[in-house]
Image (tube, rainbow, N blue to C red):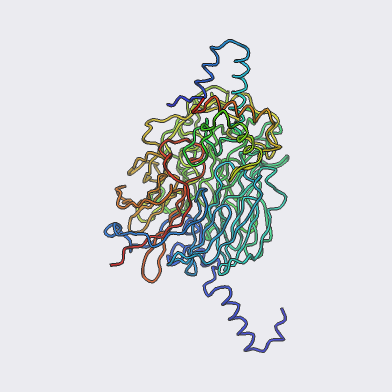
Amino acid sequence: MKIFPALTSLALGAFISTSAAADDAAMIEAGAETFSTYCATCHGNNLESSGQTFDLRKLRASERGRFQNSVTKGKNQMPPWQGVLSEDEIESVWRYIRANAYEK
Amino acid sequence: MKRSSFTAPLYLAGVFTLAGIAGAAAQTTADLNKDQNTPGDVLVYGMGPHGQRYSPLTRINKDNVKRLVPKWSYSMSDSNGAEAFPLVANGMIYTTNHISTVAVDALTGKQVWKVTHDYPPEILRIVCCGIVNRGAAIYEGKIIRSTLDNHLIAMDAKTGKVVWNVQSPGISAETGYSMTGAPLVADGVAVVGVAGAEFGIRGFLEGFDAATGKHLWRQYTVPAAGEPGHETWAGDSFKVGGGSSWVTGSYDPELDLVFWGIGNPAPWNPRGRKGDNLFTNSVFAVRPKTGERVWYYQTSPEDPFDYDAVQTPVVATIKVENKPRKVVMQANRNGFLYVLDAANGKLLAANAYDKMNWADGVDMKTGRPNTTESFKKALAGENVTIWPSVTGSTNWQHMAYSPKNGNLFINVIHVGMTYQAPEPPKNLAMGKPTGNGTVKRTTVYDDPNVLGFLKAVDPMTGKAKWSVPYKSPNFSSTMVTASDLVFTGVMTGEFQALDAKTGKLLWSFQTPSGIVGQPITWEKDGKQYVTIMSGIGGVYAMRSGDPNLVNVPTGASLWTFGLFDK
């Protein structure tokens, strides 16, 4: 049985009692759901890529603009999501990815 | 046509010319029906209308298979999954991917023609499981294929010139429909299915005149109000009920029945669609000319686990209680191997062929699964561990059947899951996601180094005569020959031949990417060849995060092998 990093970070989140952290945890959880609905198809369940498509956990904090561009306009085989995903949903997916990124 | 204006000799000459254009060996219904016994060509998905993936050829055998070498390879110029079934006719190999159809000289590997089918990028929003196409059909000199944007296109087999191009009437990507499967031509009708049970479609199977593209019929898989079976859907849940038909079926000319597997109910989360959800997860037998459903058999009523019944039903005459009987066999995604009477759908056997815990056998009288406590808890929203996972004990990859040794050769996925269906989703609509995001799950393994097996299985008992473990599950289809060789591909790129009697590995060749394709074999000028596509992709490679695959590059190519000439 595998333990996923997403679950680990959610569990850790529960121990931090400030409301800002709680908001962030809620955002990350919402992002996980949006990711599961729209993105996991190509980018892997729970962000786990098996190497054939872009591993989103490689995204760095400075790459928010690049992320936005790919999501809204599409890239290579990725369809554009403008008009399907709201700005809030895109932000929540970004937070979810960053919470699980290789480089914090 | 005014015949009177022709003089007799001119009229005859005209007939000869027409025959020449259509190809001296146009692929008639009679030719398609006997495809399995004419190994000089491969005309029907599954190597014959029965879908057995069995070849009578024996030139390549256990004694010489070690001398199998590549004759040529051809680039598909594509980084998506190569899942197509190649066809062989007129000295050419025809194959497809999501965006093109190609004809390649069968002996040299040189491209003869290529047609591209561009589509708007937004289409890919509703493609759940890989940007793929699983192959074409051939009929009377035309190559016929479906496209992601729900077109059916016929091309001249010699030139690639488009003969007709029709759209499936009244549906669109906006409402969740796409097409990835190969058409099956049965008695002159091109039968095609749709994908989209992960996007709230109302599924169907439909038939087009293979000569003209004229739409002939549509058989819905989810009944509308007033139709039989409608009562098996709670409230308005039928409106986004799923029941796709994305994997190609089989055909028995004698019974004149097309057998086709029907996909999962939508959404995956079952809590808002109480009832059996007919006719999702069923095997259909339909008349190719009219689409009339002659019988059906539902494998997984009220399914929480995406247990599509889409696997190609394989037709064969086997011994049942010591009497020969024509049956259809399906290694279902739910873990049961079903044997049904081909004429009437009567259940003859249903046995587990891999680990499962959602049901404990099938009631042979009612045909219903004996569901377990785990299944009932899953419906109630509790967190449970379930085998097999949503990927199934098989997925779309096809099994082969050898009438010579009586076994099925099945690439089995050995993966379980934790599963929970939260509060049922609201605001469901056609074209909106109804799959993965509606349930919560994680992956469970017995042994992280054994996620799949190739098994030789007895159809009536489900018991394996032999079983070969694989680190990642094989999503390649299998093929078996009269010389008792089983061919399959591996996710990490190996193309393999195994002994059909023992499972012993006899030959392996490393192709440039992972294999999720379909092996075929054929002969020309007294020599036997084996052809397969390489190119990782599809649902498992994209979703699973399998660490065994991180060093498998993408890149689709077509390969043909033959014995090394001394």
Q: In the visual, does B564 lie left or right of A67?
A: left
Q: Is residue B250 visible?
A: yes
Tell me if residue A3 comes above or below residue B563 in the rendering.
above
Residue farthest to the top? A17
Q: In the visual, does B547 lie left or right of B308?
A: left
Image spot of residue B64 (x, y percent): 28, 60
Task: From the viewer's side, name the closer residue of B408 and B136.
Answer: B136
Residue farthest to the left? B63
Tell me if residue A88 comes above or below residue B563 in the rendering.
above
Count of numbered badges drawn on the protein: 0
Residue farthest to the front? A62
Image spot of residue B471 (x, y percent): 37, 38
Image spot of residue B229 (x, y percent): 65, 39
> Which quadrant of the figure contains the N terminus of chain B?
bottom right
Q: Give the image quarter of residue B305.
A: top right
> Which quadrant of the figure contains the C terminus of chain B?
bottom left
Determine the residue positioned at 36% across, 67% down: B527
Q: Is residue B329 visible?
A: no
Determine the residue positioned at 37% across, 64% down: B528
Q: In the visual, does B126 lie left or right of B547?
A: right
Image spot of residue B140 (x, y percent): 57, 68
